[in-house]
Amino acid sequence: MDADEKLSPGSRKKYKSDIKAVLAVTKLDSFHAVIKKHKASSTKLMQATKANGDAYSINSKKGWGQVLLFVLDRYIRDHLPLSGRHKLTKKAFEVAHSSFVSLFHELKELSGNEKKQKQAEESTGKIAFPEYLRRIKEAYGQDSKEFLVASLYSVLTVRDNYGKMVLIGFEKQNDKKGNFLIVNPSKFELILNSYKTNKKGTESIRFKLGASKEHKALKLLVRAWIKKMKLKSGDMIWGGKGKGSPLSPLVGAMNKRVGVPGSINSLRQMKVSEIGPDAPFAQREKLAKTMSHSVFTQPHYQVKLGPRTKTV
């Protein structure tokens, strides 16, 4: 592992720490022994407790399962069969690998359920977007940057992708790398080329504003903002020709003022929670696509929304 140049220093340190924990919990002296005794090892890892009797966290155990699979797949699979002191046949490898896959999947499911349980039990302080927009408008005014930011996130609840968005007039100005807002007499469209889950840079999120009441209201806000800031094609939508900056600090300050914890991730939780876990799959899948995450990740954003009215 020390010679693996593809591993970052942080990942190498984490994996080595988890391997030491696996050996300590199983009370075995080698990784080979853990593989040989995979059934007993899986049981010990699942039931592991600390010296004071407290159970290890589910996420800690999940890390152990992950490092087992990482080592098996990355450093052992391609060198089978092994002979000598660490003899290991392909069949024995596959049996052990299957055992650890089951362990990891069970821990991954437990981790997800634990997270959902905590989110369901706690008073989140998060609210539905209509109430959120009401509070932001009351606190900052309708023609404010804050209300425009909140309105953008209400319509398209992405991550911190609006801070570097550039105003353009035509599609040909889209360089397929940055994030853009096209505004012209016949088109009003948000284009995200740069976002967290677009690892290969080959998929863009395109969102056209239509004729709904919500979309019309946002278009009016944007046009008023463009006029107020005297923006031209090629300008950052928040003003100027610079590189832009993240909006997370601004959103965090906005949220704090109106009694909502957190920053942009809270807005994403609010959007998912508005439609709820029992919405038709097609509706949940459509929302997941616009939010640039998996429909299977989406339940982790589900939280309990608070009351719809509050004096700011």
Image: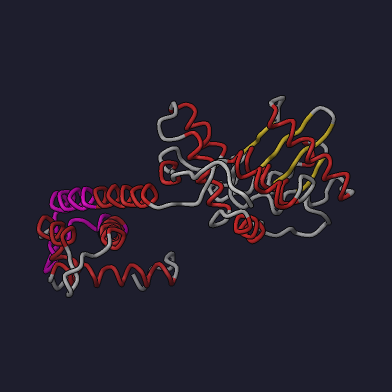
Residue 26 on image: x %, y %? 14, 67
* Residue 128 visible (yes or no): yes
Residue in the foreground of this view, choosing between 166 and 12:
166
Q: Is residue 101 magenta?
A: yes
| Display coloring | secondary structure
Residue in the foreground of this view, choosing between 83 and 133:
133
* Residue 75 visible (yes or no): no
The majority secondary structure of the magenta stretch comes to helix
From what the image shows, is residue 219 above or below residue 118?
Answer: above
Residue situated furthest front in the rendering: 311
Residue 248 on image: x %, y %? 62, 58
Magenta extent: 74-103
Residue in the foreground of this view, choosing between 166 and 52:
52
Residue 282 on image: x %, y %? 47, 26
Residue at x 11%, y 55% (from the top left corner): 39
Q: Is residue 266 magenta?
A: no
Residue at x 43%, y 72% (from the top left corner): 9
Residue in the foreground of this view, choosing between 154 and 127:
127
Judged left or right of residue 211, residue 98 is left
Residue 300 on image: x %, y %? 41, 46
Residue at x 42%, y 66% (from the top left corner): 7
From what the image shows, is residue 135 above or below residue 295?
Answer: below
Q: In which quarter of the image is the N terminus?
A: bottom left
How many circles with numbers are drawn on the protein?
0
